[in-house]
Image (cartoon, grey):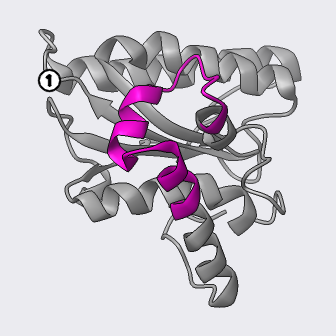
Amino acid sequence: MPTKYLVKFERGYYYHVFNRAVGDENLFYGPGDYKEFKKHIKNQLGAHGSILCYCLMPNHYHLLFHVADNQEVNVKKAIPEAIRQLEIKHAQRINFERDRKGTLFMRPYKRICVTTEGNLFRLFHYIHLNPVHHGISESYENYKWSSFSEICLGSSNIIDYEEVIELFQDLDNFRESHKIVFKLKQASPVPQDEFEK
């Protein structure tokens, strides 16, 4: 696996964290699975920084995570352990509910450090448009298991709403930038990422 997917976490940096199920399996089978995974995201990662956006798809997930500057723990160890626990707890639930055994997630999970402002904004768009890109939904705005609508409504219990709006300057810019990117991709679709179904 390319080393760009295995970077170490550092204080103050932004990271794209993502993973998928093994083989042709799913990570999520119903609303309860999605809801529990969201709870685990907050419980495991919330203490170490800000979750800025997410998208949960049937067989994979994406997170945009900002590591806090004031972390007193060793983030190079604490955050990987938090993500490990996130995936373990979800795998235990699915294994119990589906009467299955063994590994659910690919190993290792992938993470990329976001080093430019342009890439940070592109990542918001990429994550929120993912359901349309994969043909899961016709509308990124109404997809239930991403943070887009939560940010628009200011109703999320895991997203740092204020930090997101500060990055985009206001909610109108947040909405409009997504709309522009969506229209451009509809007019000239191109591969978004190496990470595909």
Image position of 187 with respect to 168: above or below: below
Image position of 160 with respect to 182: above or below: above
Residue at 63 percent across and 71 percent down: it is 182
Residue extent of the magenta highlight:
152-177
Residue at 25 percent across and 58 percent down: it is 117
Specify the quadrant of the image occupied by residue 102.
top right
| Residue 99 visible in the picture | no
Secondary structure, mark 1, is: loop
Residue 174: horizontal and vertical position, in percent?
Answer: 50, 51
Q: In this view, does 150 lie to the left or right of 171?
A: right
CA neighbours of label 1 inside 10 A, class few (<14), some (14 to 19), many (20+): few
Residue at 42 percent across and 38 percent down: it is 165
Disc 1 residue type (three-letter): Asp
Residue in front for this viewpoint, 100 or 140: 140
**Which quadrant: the C terminus?**
bottom right
Residue 17: horizontal and vertical position, in percent?
Answer: 42, 42
Q: Is residue 52 left or right of residue 69?
A: right
User: Quick check: is 153 in the magenta stretch?
Assistant: yes
Residue 33: horizontal and vertical position, in percent?
Answer: 77, 24
| Residue 37 visible in the picture | yes
Q: Is residue 189 left or right of residue 93?
A: left
Residue in front for this viewpoint, 48 or 152: 152
Kindly report the secondary structure that dominates the magenta region of the rendered protein. Answer: helix
Q: In this view, does 184 lie to the left or right of 120?
A: right
Residue linked to disc 1: 69
Residue at 59 percent across and 82 percent down: it is 184
